Amino acid sequence: MERTGVKNRMVLLFFLLLSCVFYTQKSSSAEIDRLQEEIGSQYLQKGKLYDGIEQSKKAIRLSEEINYTKGKARGYIHIASFLHSLGKYNEEQLYLQKAEALLAEYEDDPLLLSAFFAAYAKNYHELGFMEKSNENYNKAIKAALKINNKQQKRKRLHYIYGSKAVNFGRIQDNDSMYYYIHKAYKILPRVVEATNLTDYFIYKKKNQDSAKFYLDKAEGLLKVSTETFDYLVFNYMSGRYYKSQKDYKKALEFYEKSLSLSFKMKRPKNIMKNYKDIAEIYSLQDNVYKANEYLQKYTKLRDSFDQTNLMALQTSGKKIIEDEKKQSRNSNKKLYYILGGLFLGITVIISLLSFSYYRKAKKKDLLLKENKSVILQKDRKVKELEQKVNENFDEIIQLAKENSSEFWGRFQEVYPDFRYKILDINPNLKTSELILSAYIYLGFNTKDIAEYTFKAVQTVKNNKYNLRKRLNIPTQDDLIVWIRSHAG
């Protein structure tokens, strides 16, 4: 009897421990969900995009520990969103592909599914693949309509309709553009849609009264908004409105505010748009010097942007071809089943279907060839850019070895993000420390730096030690690897 009692107590203890494990997992999943809900609003609006990426990676690690697939997928989509805001579309694709690999695990979650398709649609939009972008927005809408929570459904549909309107604006389909902007505005009146309607009436309909009506609406909505991006787009659209009114002084004031907020939120695409419009304002004022200054800033940032994301164009092109092949294979399977069933009794219908299939297959082959041609052109551009990058790298190395006064300026031209990223870590770094960081980034060791800058080896060691402290780099971390990963 005593042995039986001990055995029963052990079994009871085992089940209690097992229950605790399951309870902990459930609690951890809820904690991960709460963490991920806070990430977007907490970091995106404040421009702390790199912090948001790190927090998303933390959520992914926590999800991996308890095998929480939806948490991992949501984390990948969040990182893709931050990278999108930074204009890093190629890296964004890598995380979207990770989320896509888990698609089968969250097809029953319409909120997450719609977020995934909307993220891919945004990426395709920026790379100019409008048809693929709209295709993914349509999938996102289909998923969003299945969301049970009414508030979440409204917010998601509002976002998708507004984004799809931008697509139609880009291909000059003004009627469809207005339809989707107005649809988003009716669901949830917000600053972004009000400013888009302002732009529509300024440049598409040439109706200044309606444009001012919606700009005033945007200003009213701004009073209850807590989102920095709303202020950014309102100031930008105000600049466009007053430019159309030929009130260039007022337009310039609004553009400058929008530009400042674009830097704060680390949104290179918005920075470029403001540079371009400010250059146009100065040109209209016959201020050639300032017009050229901002046009050069715009051109430099645009070229850097294009160079960084050319690989994303190539990757997207290849993905589109692979998707078409996959769809073709799936279509073939379905067609074979149909043919097999019809073969027994209806030979004529089989012949007609076979002929129809042949025509479709031929059309798809032609489309694949066209897409492959586009990819080859992109490959050539990539090789040309790689050659240019190599030449720039050799030039910088030579300037560094000569301890040239032109080294730091040329280094910033070739690596435009380096200075911003490292100053984001410590804004009080001196120019000499920035230059030392650049030498380290290029791979020079202590002896090389001492030789090229005419300093003692011990002096360079001391400088590197101080730099490590200023950047809070752990002693166990390699200095070159750390700087390249955080400022590259």
Image: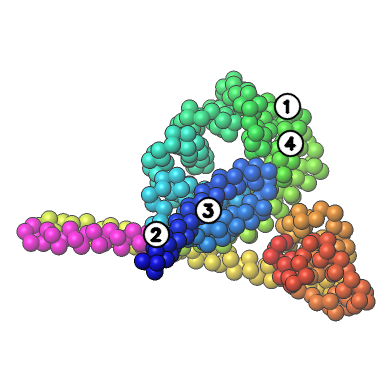
For disc 4, the marked residue is 257
Secondary structure type for disc 4: helix
Tell me the residue that label 2 is attached to.
323
Q: As shown in the figure, which amino acid type bears the numbered disc 1?
A: Asp
Q: Decide whether residue 343 is among the magenta residues.
A: yes
Of marks 4 and 1, which one's residue comes earlier in the chain?
A: 1
Marks 3 and 4 sit apart, C-alpha to C-alpha, by 42 Å
Along the viewing direction, whichever of 85 and 298 lies nearer the viewer: 85
- Of the residues under marks 3 and 1, which one precedes in the sequence? 3
In the image: residue 429, left or right of residue 238: right
**Comes first in the chain, label 4 or label 2:** 4
As measured in the structure, the alpha-carbon distance from the residue carrying label 2 to the one carrying label 3 is: 36 Å
Q: Is residue 139 left or right of residue 236?
A: left
- Dot 3: element: helix
Residue position for label 3: 28
Q: Which residues are magenta?
A: 320-347
Of callouts 3 and 4, the N-terminal one: 3
Q: Residue 22 at x, y = what percent?
A: 46, 56
* Pointer 1 residue: 247
Q: Is residue 454 left or right of residue 39?
A: right
